[in-house]
Image (spheres, helix red, strand yellow):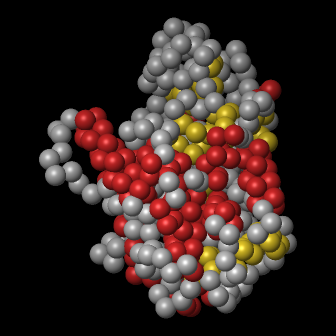
């Protein structure tokens, strides 16, 4: 195929998009503004850098996040393969060594003879077929250009990242290894137990600590999955104890009992030389992070390799601005990734893959992709492009988006199982019916 597609952004969506197009014989010019133009959250100039958490969420087959991974596997996702190669222990979730993951993605991109990488900021919509995968930290100039074409209002929310600590600075006499409901010393997480007095003192210090953005946020300002830990604490003294710090399924080996609360630490890399504080996205100043988070049992001498940060993310009003293929009506430009409001790492990968498929379909004169709304990705796309969707906000894939069952079981577990079974069957049937885009994917084993 002689045409070249411009892809803007070498994040998760952009890299998946570029690799999928190249696999189908389409030339790609992939633009990335880093390192010339830095963003408020990125720390490197690497491909597909994960800026918030290192977790790609659950792999369980009967949850929405697990179903989305299965669908990506069936469609031949490049980045999901990289994630599994770079995985670190995380119980039932897929978590990765960020540096290894970025390196693997970069090696695939740079090894492709059909992908040209250009390190330059893009300030206007490219001419010809293109995919804008600039992410929620899209440069002001490019987002202004996108907004001007869409004619919609600028939309945004605040997002945050958690701090990372040096493994050698964690007190292993206090912090213990255990995944919930498993035996000690066999788990994928480190747990810092808090008794009642320690928890009370920690929460009091947390809500009174100095913030970078000194304001009380409305819930609509914050993405629900990444609310700063101090904002969660402000909703009620026990909110954290029933949320990120819930101690259920854990036993403190020092007491033989369940702690009052527990902070979990997840490995950042395969060597386990660094750990992030799970659920500890924050807007606190760096000195306050050091002071307050060192109040956590086991972290009294914590050495912070990276402090948490908060930043504003931008996205478009996709239900009123984009068509079913995430294309800007009347143009050959598509959007992909978190700039569309499809929130989450795996969701970004999925939207990049979908943008590649629809761009390829348009170039080759084939019908666009129309995934069943009974599945993970199809239901997310339907939500994000439905003009009836009101008060559009960033959304993770979840069962609440799936088309309802005709006769749903009353039992929640049975209902989830039924939704998952239907999703798998309908998705496989669709792939089998589209050999023009998926080859023999419909007949291969999952």
Residue 185 drawn at (x, y percent): 62, 14
Q: In this orientation, does residue 224 appear?
A: no
Q: Residue at x 62, y 71 (%)?
A: 133
In the rendered view, tell whether residue 407 sits above or below residue 199. Answer: below
Taking the view exactly as shown, the residue that stands out farthest to the right is 36
Q: Quadrant of residue 43?
A: bottom right
Task: Tell me if residue 116 comes above or below residue 102 in the rendering.
Answer: below
Asked if residue 24 is positioned above or below residue 173 in the image, the reply reads below
Residue 363 position in % (x across, y down): 57, 80
Q: Which residue is drawn at the image coordinates 80% and 54% (left, top)? A: 107
Q: On the image, which quarter does residue 20 sit in?
A: bottom right
Nearest the eye: 210 or 254: 254
- Can the viewer see residue 269 in this picture? yes
Residue 209 rendering spot, x and y as whole percentages: 62, 48
- Above or below, comparing residue 140 to residue 394 in the picture: below
How far across and how far down the image is residue 364, in percent? 55, 78
Does 74 sit left or right of 293 as displayed? left
């Amino acid at each position: 195929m002689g045409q070249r597609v411009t892809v803007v952004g070498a994040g998760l969506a952009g890299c998946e998009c570029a690799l999928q197009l190249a696999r189908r014989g389409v030339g790609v010019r992939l633009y990335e503004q880093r390192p010339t133009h830095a963003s408020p959250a990125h720390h490197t100039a690497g491909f597909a850098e994960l800026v918030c958490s290192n977790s790609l969420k659950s792999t369980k087959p009967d949850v929405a996040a697990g179903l989305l991974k299965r669908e990506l596997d069936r469609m031949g996702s490049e980045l999901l393969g990289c994630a599994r190669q770079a995985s670190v222990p995380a119980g039932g979730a897929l978590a990765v060594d960020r540096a290894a993951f970025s390196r693997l993605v970069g090696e695939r991109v740079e090894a492709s003879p059909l992908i040209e990488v250009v390190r330059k900021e893009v300030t206007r919509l490219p001419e010809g077929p293109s995919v804008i995968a600039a992410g929620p930290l899209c440069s002001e100039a490019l987002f202004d250009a996108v907004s001007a074409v869409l004619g919609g209002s600028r939309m945004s929310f605040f997002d945050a990242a958690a701090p990372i600590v040096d493994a050698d600075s964690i007190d292993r006499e206090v912090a213990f290894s255990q995944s919930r409901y498993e035996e000690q010393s066999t788990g994928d997480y480190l747990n810092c137990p808090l008794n009642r007095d320690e928890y009370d003192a920690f929460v009091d210090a947390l809500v009174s600590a100095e913030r970078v953005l000194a304001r009380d946020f409305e819930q609509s300002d914050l993405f629900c999955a990444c609310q700063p830990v101090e904002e969660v604490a402000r909703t009620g003294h026990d909110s954290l104890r029933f949320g990120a710090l819930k101690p259920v399924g854990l036993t403190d080996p020092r007491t033989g009992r369940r702690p009052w609360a527990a902070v979990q630490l997840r490995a950042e890399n395969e060597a386990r030389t660094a750990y992030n504080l799970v659920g500890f996205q924050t807007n606190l100043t760096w000195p306050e992070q050091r002071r307050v988070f060192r109040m956590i049992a086991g972290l009294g001498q914590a050495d912070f390799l990276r402090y948490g940060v908060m930043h504003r993310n931008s996205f478009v009003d996709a239900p009123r601005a984009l068509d079913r293929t995430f294309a800007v009506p009347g143009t050959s430009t598509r959007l992909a990734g978190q700039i569309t409001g499809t929130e989450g790492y795996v969701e970004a990968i999925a939207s990049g893959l979908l943008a590649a498929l629809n761009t390829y379909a348009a170039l080759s004169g084939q019908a666009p992709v129309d995934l069943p709304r009974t599945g993970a990705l199809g239901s997310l796309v339907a939500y994000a492009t439905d003009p009836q969707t009101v008060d559009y906000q960033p959304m993770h894939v979840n069962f609440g988006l799936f088309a309802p069952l005709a006769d749903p079981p009353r039992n929640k577990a049975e209902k989830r199982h039924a939704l998952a079974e239907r999703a798998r069957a309908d998705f496989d049937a669709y792939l089998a019916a589209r050999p023009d885009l998926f080859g023999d994917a419909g007949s291969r084993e999952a």
